[in-house]
Amino acid sequence: MAVSAPFGEVAAGVDRMVSPAAGASPAARRPLVELSQVDLAYPGGTLAVKDLTLDVAEGELMAVVGPSGCGKSTLMKLVSGLVRPTKGRVAVAGRDVAGPLKIAGMAFQNPTMLPWLTIRQNVMLPLKIVEPFKAEFAAKRKGEFRERADALLATVGLADAGDKRPWQLSGGMLQRASLCRALIHDPKLLLLDEPFAALDQFTREELWAVLQALWMKKRPTVILVTHDLREATFLAGRVVVMTSRPGRVVREQAIPFPYPRTIELTYGNAFGGETLALRGAIFDARGGTTVAQR
């Protein structure tokens, strides 16, 4: 597919073919994220996840799907350190997660921006919080960080948006800026919780290409939570299916298509077969039926 504006620049330099196995197999590469036999019970006794075991390889782009209430967002909270497990171990980069991670960037369904700040200032916010950037920011290195933010905005087709306010941008443009904010401090881990769910189909597909290109360029470890099976199959090297509450992994499906992937691919029989297999696994997961690993 010829990549058109506004994200033509994003694809520049990433047109090489990359095997999904390069970032898809925890067995082939050391895991960055490890969850081992994790339980989490919320106040009141609701068991959100039980015996949740999962490894995410360094540099992998993995998607998590499953029926509503299966614990996908709970998984993200556990990995990010926003909640602690009732039982089991959660580790990132070989260390137990004991609090909010500084090496993680996060983007959510609603790209919340501070309305009194410009887009550039919103993108730069993590640099004022996360070390070592925080100390450097206080030491008046704002000009260097401004250049970093502008370069990232240009990469996602927002070269002229830095001085604008959030209310002047469309939903798709705000989500692009949100991705920039999540990546501004070069995180090793990127957590994406339904980041494109509120957008129309065409804008979502444009942002799939944006995210794919950013991942190919920077290679962070990405965990993407989504309800969109096409999105999961298009972006991920591996898709994990979780069962109904209490959530646990019941299927891991490797996606065989090399990167970069095109929208045309999503209309082919092979792609349809992958999404259909995921749909069947989720159908079984709703009833708590364990599906054999593929």
Image (cartoon, rainbow, N blue to C red):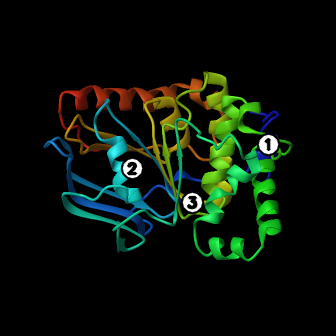
Give how far apart the Cα atoms at labels 1 and 3 are: 21 Å
- Dot 1, how many residues are within 10 Å of its Cα: few (below 14), some (14-19), or many (20+)? many
Q: Earlier in the sequence, mark 1 or mark 2?
A: 2
Q: Earlier in the sequence, mark 2 or mark 3?
A: 2
Q: Nearer the viewer, residue 230 or 221?
A: 221
Q: Which mark is residue 158?
A: 1
- Dot 2, how many residues are within 10 Å of its Cα: few (below 14), some (14-19), or many (20+)? many
- Which residue type carries mark 3? Pro
Residue at (71, 71) in percent of width and height: 137
Q: Nearer the viewer, residue 125 or 161?
A: 125
Q: Quadrant of the N terminus?
A: top right
The x, y position of residue 207, in whole percent, is 65, 36
The residue where tag 3 is placed is 220
Residue at (64, 44) in percent of width and height: 114
251 over 92 or under it: above or below = above
- Dot 3, how many residues are within 10 Å of its Cα: few (below 14), some (14-19), or many (20+)? many
The x, y position of residue 192, in whole percent, is 50, 46
12 over 134 or under it: above or below = above
To which quarter of the image does residue 22 belong? Answer: bottom right
To which quarter of the image does residue 87 belong? Answer: bottom left
Q: Can residue 168 be spotted in the picture?
A: yes
- Which residue type carries mark 2? Met
- SS for tag 3? loop
Q: Quadrant of the C terminus?
A: top left
Q: Earlier in the sequence, mark 1 or mark 3?
A: 1
- SS for tag 1? loop
Using residue 18 as the reference point, say whether residue 244 is left or right of it. left
The residue where tag 2 is placed is 76
